[in-house]
Amino acid sequence: MTTPGTLEGLRHLASGKVRDLYAVDDRHLLLVASDRISAFDVVLDDQVPAKGEVLTGLTRFWLELLGDLVPNHLAGWRASELPAGARHLAGRAMLVRRLQMLPVECVARGYLAGSGWKDYQATGAVCGIPLPRGLRQADRLPAPIFTPATKAQTGHDQNISEAEMAERIGAGIAAHLRELTLEVYRRGADHAARRGILLADTKLEFGLLDGEVVLADEVLTPDSSRFWPAGGWAPDSSPPSFDKQYVRDWLERQTWDMTPPAPRLPPDVVAGTAARYRECYERLVGRPLDAWLAEARRS
Ligand code: Q0Z
């Protein structure tokens, strides 16, 4: 159903671990979020039911909330707005305007996690941004920071300085992306906190359309961000991931060297993970996931 390369009348352009990209016409693409899940950088053989709908429904929610801040690439998501061969994917598919993508990953961090924590331990700074001494893993930062990276074809994104970012895309656009990214983070973190979820960090992508900066890709989803249940947070720890913790905990109890293929997940781990993705949508949006599915499929 969401296997890439099988959409009638649409040319498959690219696939990530989770999402697939198709050409629609000169000016539009179709972005499809599958139910695939990765853990420890490996795409698992098991799918998580309705995960793709959670990613797409959340992105559409945030893009609407952020519409007054920055224009975005979303051009349609209702069944009637999708290409004929993709209407069965309503709820997990977005018709998007084709942009000239800017070759930087725009990351905002409000907490010390992942590569930021590693960088801090080694250098006392994150991506060259000096931070106070004595911060612990998962600590909240004094203020959110902007830490751009370059898209690596294989492996992990490479952090770059703001000066390097400016060399790549120009100082004016770089400064604009920095301010937009921090404001998206502040708004997202504020909204999530009121619903019991901490937004540790998030990664955004932008493109240009007719010279204008446009927010692209998925936005403030569990796949592009670290979401922590507020009640599970403690400094000096690696807080549980809101969505993937069941999968990670179970995989860590198996004998597996973290190279593909991963062990097959038991049904209760799949079901528990699906429930967490659904809960993530419902807490953030304040509506049942099924209302999103019905709305997308209606027309
Ligand atoms: C996004 C990606 C993949 C999912 C290209 N609006 C746009 N205009 C032009 N290009 C893109 C977009 Cl979103 C674009 N990606 C990343 C790759 C699956 C997203 F294989 N690549």
Image: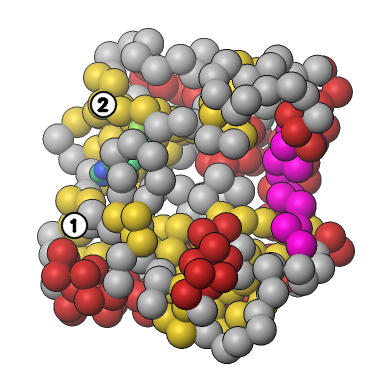
Residue 190, given in percent of the width and then of the height, sits at: 65, 75
Q: Quadrant of ligand 1?
A: top left
Q: Is residue 253 left or right of residue 82?
A: right
Residue found at the very far front of the displayed protein: 122
Q: Assess disc 2: are there few (<14), some (14-19) or many (≥20) residues with their C-alpha within 10 Å of its C-alpha.
A: few
Q: In the image, what residue occupies the spot 16% across and 66% down? A: 169
Q: In the image, what residue occupies the spot 60% across and 87% down? A: 133
Q: Which residue is mark 2?
A: 13
Q: Is residue 181 visible?
A: no
Q: Which residues are magenta?
A: 237-248
Q: Are marks 1 and 2 in contact (CB under 8 Å)?
A: no
**Separation of marks 1 and 2 at Cα, in angstroms:** 20 Å
Colouring convention used in this rendered image of the protein: secondary structure
Ligand 1 closer than 8 Å to the CB at disc 2? yes
Q: In the image, what residue occupies the spot 50% across and 69% down? A: 122
Ligand 1 closer than 8 Å to the CB at disc 1? no
Q: Assess disc 1: are there few (<14), some (14-19) or many (≥20) residues with their C-alpha within 10 Å of its C-alpha.
A: some
Q: Is residue 252 left or right of residue 98?
A: right
Residue 264 lies in the magenta-colored region: no
Q: Of helix, strand and loop, which mostly describes the magenta segment?
A: loop
Q: Which residue is mark 1?
A: 209
Q: Earlier in the sequence, mark 1 or mark 2?
A: 2
Q: Is residue 48 left or right of residue 57?
A: right
Q: Where is 266 relative to 206, above or below?
A: above
Q: Nearer the viewer, residue 111 or 10?
A: 111
Residue 10, given in percent of the width and then of the height, sits at: 28, 19
Among the 4 quarters of the image, the one containing residue 104:
bottom left
